[in-house]
Structure formats: structure tokens, C-alpha cells
Amino acid sequence: GDVSAQATADLTARDGYLLKYPMAAVEGLLHTVHDSTGLPWWQTIALATLLGRVVLFPLQVYQSRGAARMTLIKPQLEAYSARIKAGYSKKTGAGLDDAEVARLEMQQLMDRNGVRPWSTMGSALVGMPVWVSFFFALRKMVYVDGVGLSEGGMLWFPDLTQHDPYYMLPVLSGLSLFGMVSLGDAGQAGAKPDAQQQMVKNVMRGAAVVIVPATAWFESGVFIYWLTANALAVTQTLALRQPSIRSAVGMPPMPTAASSSATESGMLSAFGGEPAAAAAPPKAAPLILDEALLSATPPQAGRPRGKTAGGRGKKRSKR
């Protein structure tokens, strides 16, 4: 109503905020949801957060799809990167030529598999300003606007403009953030993280612990937003790990230990020999995402080779 319109106008008119217009849009969304549904403010915040997640879900799927495709060809990418680095380190014409050949082959590999490095950052680049705007808009609403948040809570936190007296909301937010970080992106599910990825994950886990005492004095309304956003992120990640959902949104199946071993052994044979042999990785291991690469079990090539070898051995012994 008039109070909502005036509150939004007041927020838009404030100076000194880089995100003042996105913040005004968020506050307008919150007031619209509250006025049209009649829900209490804690449910209004949760529902508005859910709407934001639904709108950004296609972008998250796009990011996870790109990450999943990149995960499946990660051993090949690492092998090409090693060749490029080794070629440049030689500081010779032949070394530079080899590095350029490896770079072109790596680009062809990524093109065949529909991998774009920037696609794994799309959700963060677009979603981050949205969620930051949510945070600052709520903080300004509980501090300044006074549009009913003081009576919009529930249970032990009836006043959303005050901090949780029992510190349960900060703890729950920290736990949900810890779970979200531990799960990671659905596109990287099933793959073993490298040292750098593991270090980043451990740092974020530590941040999830530190954030509990650091934000314990924040208003309860802010924690309702954080809890809802984290819970939805965890639910979304778990959903995108399901084979049926991955197939429906065009994500490749999660890699397994067996398929990873098969891919890595193929790359060792492709890149472990002479430079001439290393120039043809597509023949040593399938580089296009197909059913053979994505199957849970590697091809059983050992038995036919064993029989052939044994037959040859018998012929030689007769001679």
C-alpha cells in the first residue's frame, strides 16, 4: 500500500549506495509479496528468496552443466596444460611449436564437448549482485524503514529487527553454509578435487564456522533470508545430483571411480610416450562425451588381449 510505496521511494532516494536501485527493487518485491499474500514477514522473506532462486535456477543449471562437462575431460585438460607448460619452459622453437599444437588440440577438445570456461562462473557473476542486494535491502529495512518487521517473526524471535537471543539462527546458518560448501557445485559431483580446490573448500568451511560468532549480532530477519537461501542451495545441489534430473536438464552423468580410472589410464598412454605418440590423444581415449566415456565400467579389453597373447606364445613355442 502507501507505506510500501513510500518505503521503496525512500530507499531509492538514499545516496551513497552502489546497489541502491537493486536494493529498491528487492524491497519492492518484498513489499509486493507481503501486501498481496498477507503472510507474516518471516514467511514473506522466505517466499521472496524462493522466487529469486526460481528465477536464477536456469542460470545455475547452465553453470552446473558446464562444470560437469569440464569435470569429465579434466584429466585431458590437465595433460594438455602440462604439455603447454613444458613446451614454453624449453624456450626453443620446437618447444613453442609443441605448446601451440597442444593449445589448439585442447581448444578442439573443449569445443567438441561444449565446454566454455566462462560458463562455470555465470551464476556467480549474475547471482552475486542479486543476493548482495537482498542482504543490504533487508538490513536497511530492519534498521530504518520500520514497516512491520518488528512484529513479523515467530517462536523465539518474534521481532525480526532484533538479534536472536539464543543464537540458534546464527548456528543454523553456519551449519547450512558448511553443508552447502561441502556439497560444492553439482557439476563437480563425483570428481576428486585437486589440491587447490580442496584448499578453497577447506577455507570456506572455516569461514562457515567463523561466520557464526562474527554475525551473531545480526538481525533475525537477515538470518531468515540466509537460512532460506542456503537451504534452497543445498536442495538444488542434491536435486542436480540425481541421474533423472541431470538427464532432464542436459547434464552428463556423474563420473565414477571406474570411468575416471579408465580416462586417466587412457591419458597416460596418450601422453606418457614419445612426443609423436602424444600428438594423437583422441585415438588413445574418447574425447567426445558419449555413452562409452560416461559408462560406469571401463571396456573389458584385458581378456581378448590375454587370449591373443597366449595364442601367439603357443605358436612361438611350437616353432
Image (spheres, rainbow, N blue to C red):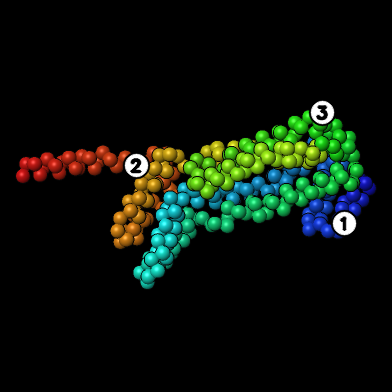
Viewer-closest of 257 and 196: 196
Name the residue at 78% across, 29% down.
Answer: 166
Please rate how many residues cluster around mark 2, counting C-alpha atoms within 10 Å: few if below 14, some from 14 to 19, many from 20.
Answer: few
Q: Nearer the viewer, mark 3 or mark 2?
A: 3
Position in image of residue 176 (x %, y %): 67, 36
Residue corresponding to mark 3: 156
For marks 3 and 2 on the same chain, the one whose residue lies earlier in the sequence:
3
Residue type at mark 2 is Pro
Please rate how many residues cluster around mark 3, counting C-alpha atoms within 10 Å: few if below 14, some from 14 to 19, many from 20.
Answer: few
Residue corresponding to mark 2: 299
Please rate how many residues cluster around mark 1, counting C-alpha atoms within 10 Å: few if below 14, some from 14 to 19, many from 20.
Answer: few
Left of 255 or right of it: where is 13?
right
Position in image of residue 87 (x %, y %): 39, 64
Say which quarter of the image contains residue 160.
Answer: top right
Residue type at mark 1 is Arg
SS at mark 3 in the image: loop
Say which quarter of the image contains residue 230.
Answer: top right
Residue corresponding to mark 1: 14
Viewer-closest of 193 and 152: 193
Residue type at mark 3 is Trp
SS at mark 1 in the image: loop
Proximity of marks 3 and 2: CB atoms separated by less than 8 Å: no
